[in-house]
Image: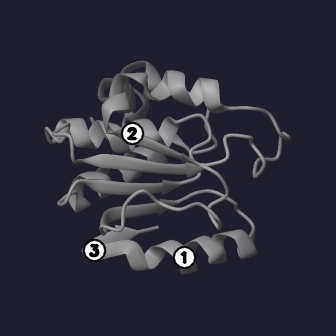
Amino acid sequence: MRAAFPEKRLANLLGEAAYVPTQTTVNERLCLFEEAHRSRQVGRFLEIGSYLGASTAILARVMYWHGKQDGKSRVYCVDTWANDAMSEGKWDTWTRFQETIAPWREVVVPVRGLSTQVALPTTEPFDLVFIDGDHSYQGCRADVDRFAGLVRPGGRAG
């Protein structure tokens, strides 16, 4: 049943957030949910590239799934919210992102700026670092070089 109806499963997990426009497929979003679910231990995820919040909603939902709205668990999201890494051109995606994450606002920490320049508000290790910002080779490489070392032992990066 799971594999036959992935859209329904995603909708059951995320509600309206399952329908946020994204370039990530339903199966990729379900895979992210599973990876986050398996890796969650210390209660910190880092997302590079949030766009309209589709993947942010998944990561935040995992925190709630585990009862991690404890004041310490967080999903840190790094983006300019200016759509500068996307093919359809620059536009402000901040308002739509805020609407998407509204149900999980207490665990989401937006960090606005370029991933190569922002200062993260924590130095603690992350369970999961999800890199989905600048899709150019140079941009991906820069994000991997900067953030992969922040994964806790046994955590995940991708």
Q: Is residue 122 left or right of residue 100?
A: left
Whole-Å distance between the Cαs marked 1 and 3?
Answer: 14 Å
Quadrant housing residue 90 = top right
Residue under label 3, please give it.
152
Q: Earlier in the sequence, mark 2 or mark 1?
A: 2
Q: How many marks?
A: 3
- Name the residue located 74 percent from the left edge and 32 percent from the top edge: 92
Q: Which mark is residue 130?
A: none
The three-letter amino acid code for the residue at tag 1 is Arg
Whole-Å distance between the Cαs marked 3 and 2?
Answer: 19 Å
Residue under label 1, please give it.
146
Residue 152: give x, y in percent of width and height.
28, 74
Location of the N terminus (image quadrant) = top left
Residue under label 2, please give it.
108
Secondary structure of residue under mark 3: strand
Q: Residues within 10 Å of mark 2 (few under 14, many from 20)?
A: many
- Name the residue located 22 percent from the left edge and 57 percent from the top edge: 40
